[in-house]
Image (cartoon, grey):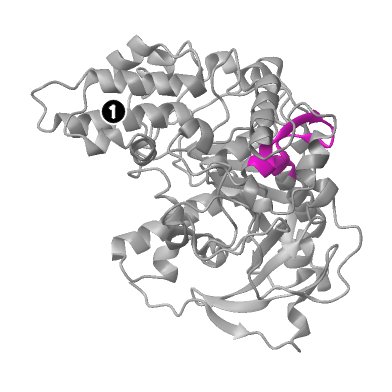
């Protein structure tokens, strides 16, 4: 393993005008990092919208009305959006500063400032990261999302933007000033900012790849479906997630979303049926009250995009059927092995505290799943996921837990089709080169694997394919969607028991 000096600051001198970038938000001053024997310019905490406070709470974001007059200090961390602080939060996420005024983005560029040279031939492909966290947690300032290694390794410009979370994100008020899905609108405005400004950081606005993991992947799929996002990106990568669920009804529609908002409103002391409901909510001075309650109830903990709205007017399957999706893009998608195991055990602690894990308990959990995912065929699911488990198994309880994780992963991540890593989220550290940035505790194999993963996804951003052997699985026909054109690395008929089997009538 090579020993690189990582994250060494090469220049932070305030007189270094070469690091100043003129944007629609104002002049941004960054710093240069030395990563993998390369220089990467890092710009943090760039505002791309008016603070979403007062009348803009629950509303679509608005672009900055006027640029900042003072130089934007891109060397310091900024605010993260209001969110729940679960046990162990700081250990995983770091000590984030939470504030409603959080709509900022980070940029990592290996290219210097090409806008000053006018050399458009040197512009680099751009990758726009959307973080996960159930649409209730997450921030671009999490340590694991330091994209300097990815920018250096792949020779691409990386942008990551904050977006609103939880109730502040998805409260639907059946009103144009509270349209729901505002976290997705935040991402949309950030994408537009990138289109307008990324050339100043050496990025090519016509080669933007959006990519995200978990709820970030749900967001990517939402942009693929949304008519509002058309033309803003060229490629997309979905890591472990999709908004495609029951084909004949959404997880939450506008009627259900409004009822959920009214219930939450009554908890906050506002009259859910009052004429000035939104005014009451906007007059609450402590935004932390909008944090989702800390609970093991996944129907409360998870937030989903509202279907039947301007941003997502159609069910995904209906949009595909009508050809109302953004088809002029390249798409790569994948998941991890036993995708849902960790989350399933978190939401159903009874499966790990008890000495027994029976078929009856499995069925009870399926009933709980049904409260959110609707119209599940309980008997078929039990039969499918428990079919290979007998009393002869060396560890029946562990086998049941894995089966539950597979069920949860299949429904929540829209089917775990790629067996590559071992649980939900464990791919992130390799995507962002953490074994290179912080090698202590990682093996040489981890180091090399991270380099390989970064090469695959940045190659896709540049050329539309990770390498020459990558299999293309889907054609353009929704009715003939599983066509394996390249057999290298593909197991035989991997979809038989899932897509074409137990889930055939659901998705």
Please tell me which residue is depicted at 52% across the width and 46% down the height of the picture. Answer: 133
Count of marks placed on residues:
1
x%, y% of residue 51?
Answer: 79, 56
x%, y% of residue 13?
Answer: 69, 88
Q: Quadrant of residue 136?
A: top right
From this view, report whether residue 90 is shown above or below residue 379.
below
How crowded pointer 1 is (Cα within 10 Å; few <14, some 14-19, many 20+) is rated as many
Please tell me which residue is depicted at 43% across the width and 77% down the height of the picture. Answer: 4
Residue tagged 1: 403
From this view, report whether residue 106 is shown above or below residue 333.
below
| Camera-side residue of 55 and 449 | 55
Please tell me which residue is depicted at 21% across the width and 34% down the height of the picture. Answer: 354
Q: Quadrant of residue 345?
A: top left
Q: Is residue 181 magenta?
A: yes
Indicate the quadrant containing the N terminus: top left, top right, bottom left or bottom right: bottom left
| Camera-side residue of 467 and 11 | 11
Q: Residues in magenta?
A: 167-185
From this view, report whether residue 17 is shown above or below residue 201.
below
Q: Secondary structure at mark 1?
A: helix
Asked whether the viewer can see residue 145, the reply is yes
Asked whether the viewer can see residue 61, the reply is no
Q: Quadrant of residue 322?
A: top right
Q: Is residue 178 magenta?
A: yes
Left or right relative to 95: residue 496 = left
Left or right relative to 493: residue 27 = right
x%, y% of residue 168?
Answer: 68, 44
Please tell me which residue is depicted at 76% across the width and 42% down the height of the picture. Answer: 281
x%, y% of residue 211?
Answer: 59, 46
């Amino acid at each position: 393993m090579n020993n690189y000096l990582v994250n060494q600051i090469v220049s932070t001198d305030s007189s270094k005008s070469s690091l100043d970038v003129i944007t629609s938000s104002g002049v941004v001053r960054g710093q240069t990092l030395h990563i993998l024997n390369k220089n990467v310019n890092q710009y943090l905490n760039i505002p791309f919208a008016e603070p979403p406070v007062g009348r803009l709470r629950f509303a679509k974001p608005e672009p900055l009305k006027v640029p900042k007059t003072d130089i934007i200090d891109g060397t310091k961390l900024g605010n993260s959006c209001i969110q729940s602080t679960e046990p162990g939060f700081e250990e995983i996420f770091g000590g984030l500063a939470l504030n409603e005024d959080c709509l900022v983005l980070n940029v990592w560029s290996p290219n210097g400032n090409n806008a000053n040279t006018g050399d458009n031939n040197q512009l680099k492909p751009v990758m726009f990261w959307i973080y996960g966290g159930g649409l209730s947690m997450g921030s671009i300032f999490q340590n694991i999302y330091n994209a300097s290694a990815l920018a250096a390794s792949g020779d691409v410009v990386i942008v990551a933007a904050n977006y609103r979370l939880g109730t502040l994100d998805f409260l639907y008020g059946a009103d144009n000033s509270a349209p729901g899905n505002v976290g997705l609108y935040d991402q949309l405005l950030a994408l537009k900012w990138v289109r307008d400004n990324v050339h100043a950081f050496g990025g090519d606005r016509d080669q933007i790849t959006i990519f995200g993991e978990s709820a970030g992947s749900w967001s990517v799929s939402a942009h693929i479906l949304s008519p509002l996002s058309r033309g803003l990106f060229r490629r997309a990568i979905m890591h472990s997630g999709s908004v495609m669920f029951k084909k004949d009804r959404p997880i939450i529609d506008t009627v259900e979303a409004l009822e959920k908002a009214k219930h939450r409103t009554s908890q906050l002391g506002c009259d859910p049926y009052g004429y000035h409901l939104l005014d009451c909510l906007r007059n609450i001075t402590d935004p932390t009250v909008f944090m989702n309650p800390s609970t093991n109830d996944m129907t409360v903990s998870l937030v989903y995009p509202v279907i039947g709205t301007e941003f997502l007017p159609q069910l995904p399957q209906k949009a595909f059927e009508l050809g109302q999706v953004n088809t002029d893009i390249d798409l790569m998608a994948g998941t991890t092995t036993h995708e849902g195991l960790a989350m399933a055990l978190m939401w159903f602690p009874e499966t790990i505290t008890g000495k027994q894990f029976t078929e009856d308990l499995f069925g009870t959990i399926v009933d709980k799943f049904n409260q959110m995912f609707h119209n599940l065929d309980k008997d078929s699911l039990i039969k499918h996921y428990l079919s290979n488990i007998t009393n002869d198994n060396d560890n029946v309880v562990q086998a049941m837990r894995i089966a539950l994780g597979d069920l949860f992963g299949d429904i929540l991540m829209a089917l775990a089709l790629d067996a590559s890593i071992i649980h939900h989220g464990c791919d992130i550290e390799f995507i962002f080169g953490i074994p290179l940035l912080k090698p202590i505790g990682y093996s040489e194999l981890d180091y090399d694997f991270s380099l390989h993963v970064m090469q695959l996804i940045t190659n896709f951003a540049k050329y539309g394919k990770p390498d020459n052997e990558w299999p293309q699985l889907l054609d353009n026909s929704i009715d003939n969607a599983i066509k394996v054109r390249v057999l290298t690395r593909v197991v035989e008929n991997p979809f038989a028991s899932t897509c074409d089997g137990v889930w055939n009538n659901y998705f």
